[in-house]
């Protein structure tokens, strides 16, 4: 058994760094020419750690023009590439980068940095996505990438990187190597090791040998701890990055928010020295990188601020099949006694077309009727239909997601719900872009501390309806019920 306290005992203590110090360093760097981080988010759950930033589900040049016009230090682009095959993912990354650069215009007026946001449990198209971003930037601007910084840590959700090893927090202060969790067995994006340098070697098929990876361990991140001087840490990080060239992978240890801020100061220093970096990260990295304070969880009143809530019930859509989601769904259905529960039968969806269509028609009619009385929980059947073929797994996932989108879209246009919660990465992406037809939104903040984000759609048929993006693999068993309780007027069990 690995205890977190035992592992951390080998490293310096945390170094207290205020968010304002990072924001100030950024402001100094951007005084002459502003810079915006463009975050290519492979599913919408990357927004759960930030607040008051624009998010796009379309990426035409005019969409970026709107987003850059908000005057914020980062912009999220919902690429949903985790649900695509490699060729489609590559094409989408390239298109996003080209359009962002076109919208930005001359680097003398607006500079762009690129972030490839992916899963904190290491699932996703790696190294494909950073490779494509780097190649596209080089082709369009002539700027070559020196290093790709990997920061999968997500402490709010119990994902930590220590000594170059990526862990999940377990019970009673234990650490579980992420390769020993259900996520490592993913049908499409599975992996065999928690040692980040070995993970990179495995995923790159040896293109980046493990010994070529630069590891920024806690000795470097917290180099200034003894003197309580963040500048010492910043220099240590920048010095360690100095040898990076030709997209050298760089792995960063992270346990606390202060570690993110120390890393941010070091990255800023490295870039000031001329290093060109891309980032492959979990959700909280951007918050630390731009020096944003940790936003307190939104209250019920804040969730509806500026909008008049509908009298209809709320719509909770559950597509994820990970064990935690199923437990959360069970708690919600047990506690939310007045909610109507409607199941989408996956076997019927995968059957003959007339049967699938009839099943969806019946589902929509049932949802609309139930929303007149209160909240409705729509979930896909919990039996996960698996296949050994990754492409077939994706096809099944898309079929199911398309059905969920159809139900949400037809419901929205018949009887708009008070709020919408979508549970699961692919589910929440497709519900946002297609079910609710959101094109532009503002991420208002988290619904729970550090996790689960609320988007406010600023256009389209869902304008003003709070939309909650809820990852499949975050929170505890009661989290879905907690979020629903905040938004609902329907009674829960005492």
Image: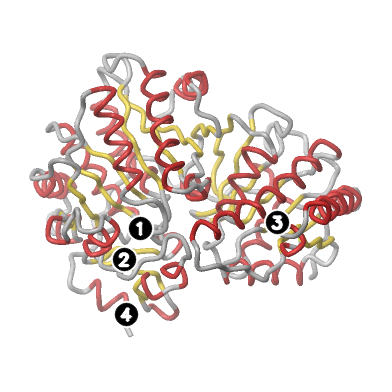
From the viewer's perspective, is the residue at label 1 or at label 4 nearer?
1
Quarter holding the C terminus is bottom right
Name the residue: 14% across, 31% down: 274
Q: Specify whether 462 is left or right of 207.
A: right
Callouts 2 and 1 close, C-beta under 8 Å: yes
Q: Earlier in the sequence, mark 4 or mark 2?
A: 4
Q: Earlier in the sequence, mark 2 or mark 1?
A: 1
Residue at label 1?
153
Residue 417 image position (x, y, % from top left) = 79, 43
Q: Secondary structure at mark 1?
A: loop
Name the residue: 60% across, 40% down: 455
In the image, 409 versus 284, the foreground residue is 409
Quarter holding the N terminus is bottom left
Q: Earlier in the sequence, mark 1 or mark 4?
A: 4
How far apart, in angstroms, are the residues tagged by discs 4 and 3? 34 Å
In the image, 222 versus 116, the foreground residue is 116
How far apart, in angstroms, are the residues tagged by discs 1 and 4? 17 Å
Callouts 4 and 3 close, C-beta under 8 Å: no
Q: Which mark is residue 3?
A: 4
Q: Specify whether 230 is left or right of 98.
A: left
Q: Specify whether 122 is left or right of 417.
A: left
Q: Earlier in the sequence, mark 1 or mark 3?
A: 1
Residue at label 3?
484
How far apart, in angstroms, are the residues tagged by discs 2 and 1? 8 Å
Mark 4 burial class by Cα count in 10 Å: few <14, some 14-19, many 20+: some
How far apart, in angstroms, are the residues tagged by discs 4 and 2? 14 Å
Residue 489 image position (x, y, % from top left) = 81, 52
Residue at label 2?
166
Q: Residue furthest front?
A: 352
């Amino acid at each position: 058994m690995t205890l977190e306290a035992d592992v951390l005992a080998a490293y310096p203590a945390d170094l207290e760094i205020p968010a304002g110090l990072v924001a100030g360093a950024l402001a100094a760097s951007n005084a002459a020419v502003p810079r915006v981080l463009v975050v290519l988010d492979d599913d919408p759950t990357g927004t759960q750690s930030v607040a008051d930033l624009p998010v796009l589900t379309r990426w035409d040049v005019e969409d970026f023009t709107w987003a850059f016009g908000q005057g914020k230090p980062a912009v999220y682009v919902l690429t949903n590439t985790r649900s695509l095959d490699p060729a489609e993912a590559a094409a989408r990354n390239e298109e996003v980068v080209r359009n962002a650069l076109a919208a930005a215009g001359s680097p003398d007026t607006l500079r762009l940095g690129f972030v490839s946001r992916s899963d904190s449990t290491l699932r996703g198209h790696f190294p494909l996505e950073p490779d494509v971003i780097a190649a596209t930037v080089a082709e369009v601007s002539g700027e070559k990438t020196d290093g790709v910084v990997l920061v999968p840590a997500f402490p709010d959700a119990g994902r930590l990187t220590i000594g170059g090893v990526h862990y999940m927090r377990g019970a009673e202060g234990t650490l579980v190597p992420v390769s020993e969790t259900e996520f490592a067995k993913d049908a499409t994006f599975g992996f065999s090791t928690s040692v980040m340098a070995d993970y990179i070697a495995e995923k790159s098929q040896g293109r980046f040998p493990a010994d070529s990876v630069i590891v920024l361990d806690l000795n470097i991140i917290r180099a200034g701890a003894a003197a309580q001087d963040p500048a010492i840490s910043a220099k240590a990080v920048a010095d360690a990055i100095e040898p990076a060239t030709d997209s050298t992978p760089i792995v960063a240890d992270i346990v606390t928010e202060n570690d993110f801020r120390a890393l941010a100061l070091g990255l800023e220093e490295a870039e000031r020295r001329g290093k060109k970096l891309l980032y492959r990260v979990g959700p909280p990295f951007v918050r630390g990188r731009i020096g944003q304070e940790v936003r307190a969880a939104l209250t019920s009143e804040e969730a509806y601020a500026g909008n008049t809530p509908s009298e209809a019930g709320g719509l909770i859509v559950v597509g994820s099949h990970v064990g935690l989601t199923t437990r959360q769904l069970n708690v919600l259905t047990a506690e939310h006694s007045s909610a109507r529960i409607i199941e989408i039968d996956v076997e019927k969806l995968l059957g003959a077309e007339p049967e699938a269509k009839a099943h969806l028609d019946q589902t929509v009619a049932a949802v609309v009727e139930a929303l007149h009385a209160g909240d409705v929980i729509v979930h896909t059947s919990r039996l996960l239909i698996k296949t050994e073929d990754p492409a077939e797994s994706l096809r099944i996932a898309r079929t199911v997601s398309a059905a969920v989108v159809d139900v949400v879209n037809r419901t929205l246009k018949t009887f708009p719900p008070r709020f919408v919660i979508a549970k699961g990465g692919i589910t929440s992406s497709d519900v946002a872009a297609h079910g609710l037809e959101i094109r532009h939104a503002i991420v208002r903040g988290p619904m729970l501390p550090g996790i689960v984000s609320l988007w406010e759609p600023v256009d389209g048929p869902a304008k003003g309806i709070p939309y909650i993006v809820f990852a499949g693999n975050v929170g505890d068993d009661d989290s879905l019920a907690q979020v629903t309780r905040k938004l609902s007027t329907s009674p829960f069990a005492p």
